[in-house]
Amino acid sequence: MLPLPRQVLASVLQRESQKHPTGKGPLAEIEFWRERNAVMSSLYEQLNLPQVGPLVQPVHQMGLSIRTVTAVLGELLPRG
C-alpha cells in the first residue's frame, strides 16, 4: 500500500488526467493548464503543512487507504 500522501497524489493525478481543455484555441489551453497548476500547487502545499505529518504517520501505520480516511472524515466533519 502506498503511503497516504502518495495515495492522495495518485488519486488527484488520476482525476486530473481525465480532464481536457474546454473550448478551442490557445486561450482554452492556457486556462486548462492554469487550473491544473492551481490544483497541484494547492495539493502540494497542503501535504507539506507541518500539521499534516503527525496525522499521516498513524494513518499509514494503521494501513488505511485514502478512501477509508476520506469516508471517515466525511462522516465526522460537519457539512455546511
Image (cartoon, helix red, strand yellow):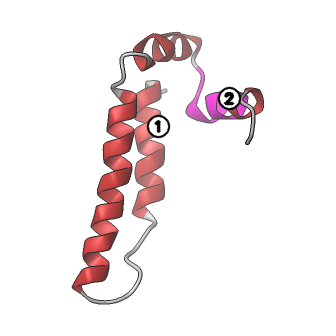
Image coordinates of residue 22 in percent, x first then y, are: 41, 81
- According to the picture, the residue beneath numbered tag 2 turns out to be 73
Q: Nearer the viewer, residue 39 or 6?
A: 39
Quadrant that contains the C terminus: top right
Question: How many numbered discs, if any?
Answer: 2
Q: Quadrant of residue 44?
A: top left
Camera sees residue 40: yes
Image coordinates of residue 63 in percent, x first then y, are: 57, 18
Asked if residue 12 lies left or right of residue 72, the reply is left
Image coordinates of residue 32 in percent, x first then y, are: 33, 70
Q: Secondary structure at mark 2?
A: helix
Whole-angstrom CA distance, mark 1 to mark 2, is: 14 Å
Residue 66 forms part of the magenta stretch: yes
For residue 7, above or below residue 37: above
For residue 9, above or below residue 57: below
Magenta region, residue range: 64-72
What kind of residue is marked 1? Answer: Val
Q: Quadrant of residue 75?
A: top right
Q: Quadrant of residue 45?
A: top left
Q: Give the farthest residue toward the bottom.
A: 24
Q: Which mark is residue 8?
A: 1
Asked if residue 6 lies left or right of residue 73, the reply is left
The residue drawn where x is 40% and y is 51% is: 13
Camera sees residue 2: no
